[in-house]
Amino acid sequence: MAACSIEGCERKVYSKGWCEPHYRRALRNGGEPTPDRQSRTTCSIEGCDKPHDARGLCHGHLQRQNRTGDPLADVPLRGTRGICSVVGCSQPVNGKDMCRSHRNRTRAKGDPRPEVPLQANPGDGWISHGYKGVPVPEELRWLTNGEAAALEHRLVMAQMLGRPLTSAESVHHRNGDRLDNRPENLELWSRYQPTGQRVKDKIEWAVQILAWYAPLVIIEGLRLAADPPRNREESTRATDDLEGLMWQPRPLSE
């Protein structure tokens, strides 16, 4: 009995010079039997080195063949598309020739906005909109209301204050550099203001501000109310004493 004409196959001929497995494979593949799976290790598509799955193709190209009738050899498989097509971006392609971030921007805004830097994560923090965010150690999370991450400039100011910042407080960079979070470059700003202009409203607002930032001024003010200055010299001294009690953030310990 003659052997199958496929090289390396020793099964007996079933039809048209092929054994039964190769003959049925030829019927499925349009008249051409593919080699046995064991005789091929990689995909037959030029440039594809993925492991062979069936019919001479890797799993990805086989799925395309099954869905469309064409393995689409000129279209890279997922995970082999290179880097994002947006100028200056080195992130891997996620879809539509763009990385995930630029693709999401395009979906949301209709434009990948290449001029706007992506959020970077160097491992010890990240940069977003020019500000640096950092992970918060567990022992400092009471300063961030339990949050495990925070903007570094707000965390530094909270350490200087010894308390969490309120929603009405912001931190200003003296030199304009949002990444320069040295304590001496930061100053506390308050966005809160009274809702009206009546004297009563302003007094309540002033007392609240002093209670937040300079409670000793209130105590000294009460003492002066009980024993007011009797001359210009005593008045000047009292004013200097009050100014000395004004709030200043304490420096962080080394």
Image: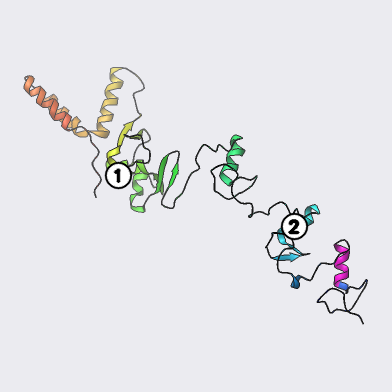
Look at the image and name its color scheme: rainbow
Is residue 26 magenta-colored? yes
Q: Position of residue 13 (x, y in %)?
A: 90, 76
- Comparing 3 with 62, the one in front is 3
Horizontal relation, residue 37 to residue 230: left or right? right
Image vertical order of residue 233 relative to residue 70, above or below: above
**Picture residue at 63% right of the left edge, 45% below the top:** 97
Examine the image and state in which quarter residue 101 appears: top right
Q: CA distance from mark 1 to mark 2?
A: 57 Å
- Comparing 249 with 215, the one in front is 249
Question: Looking at the image, can residue 136 be seen?
Answer: yes
Is residue 52 magenta-colored? no
Q: Residues within 10 Å of mark 1 (few under 14, many from 20)?
A: many
Q: Position of residue 178 (x, y in %)?
A: 38, 38
Disc with the residue nearer the chain's start (1 vs 2): 2
Examine the image and state in which quarter residue 21 appears: bottom right
Q: Position of residue 85 (x, y in %)?
A: 60, 44
Mark 2, residue position: 63
The span shown in magenta is: 21-31
Main SS, magenta region, reads: helix
Q: Position of residue 16 (x, y in %)?
A: 93, 71
Image vertical order of residue 119 relative to residue 44, above or below: above
Q: Given the image, on which type of amino acid does mark 1 rest?
A: Gln
Q: Given the image, on which type of amino acid does mark 2 rest?
A: Gln
Please state which of the two labelled residues, at mark 1 or mark 2, is closer to the viewer: 2
Mark 1, residue position: 159
- Provide the secondary structure element on which disc 2 rests: helix
Image vertical order of residue 44 relative to residue 68, above or below: below
- Provide the secondary structure element on which disc 1 rests: helix
